[in-house]
Amino acid sequence: MRCLLKVSMPTEIANQRVADGSLGKTIESILSEINPEAAYFAEDRGIRTGYIFCNVKEESDIVAIAEPWFLAFHAQVEFRPAMTLADLKKAAPSFEKTVKKYGHLPKAA
């Protein structure tokens, strides 16, 4: 399953990795093991954050994907299932079925 992996690295630890020159090399090493579809880096609420789209084939893969971030950066890691437009189009029958069953909205007053 495609997931959006959000990795938030505490400033103090990330600053240490910047100062000792290991930040980029460590991130590159982790990403080479994950082999993501895409990886973007930005700040989120003042914290260095990575947004990484990767494939989680089995639930047990979560350990191999998350642990390097925990160990290297004491990072906070979040996984979110993610869809492409093609996935969303493929889900159209589910939308229709759900709307028929649960989509009864109260009438406006």
Image (tube, rainbow, N blue to C red):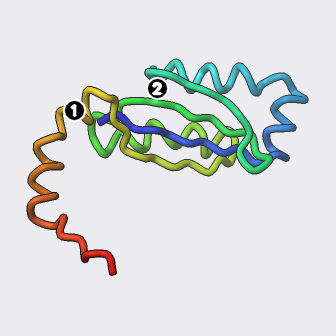
Q: Nearer the viewer, residue 34 or 92?
A: 92
* Picture quadrant where residue 15 is located: top right
Q: Is 51 on the left-hand or right-hand side of 22?
A: left
Type of the residue with mark 2? Ile
Residue furthest front as drawn? 109
Whole-percent x and y of residue 47?
Answer: 76, 45
Quadrant where the N terminus sits is top left
Nearer to us of marks 2 and 1 is 1
Q: Which residue is mark 1?
A: 89
Marks 2/1: CA–CA distance: 27 Å
Q: Is residue 44 above or below residue 97?
A: above
Q: Is residue 58 above or below residue 85?
A: below
Could you tell me which residue is drawn at 36 percent across and 44 percent down? 81
Whole-percent x and y of residue 21?
Answer: 84, 22
Could you tell me which residue is drawn at 61 percent across and 27 percent down? 40
Could you tell me which residue is drawn at 52 percent across and 31 percent down? 52
Q: Nearer the viewer, residue 102 or 36?
A: 102
Q: Is residue 56 above or below residue 103?
A: above
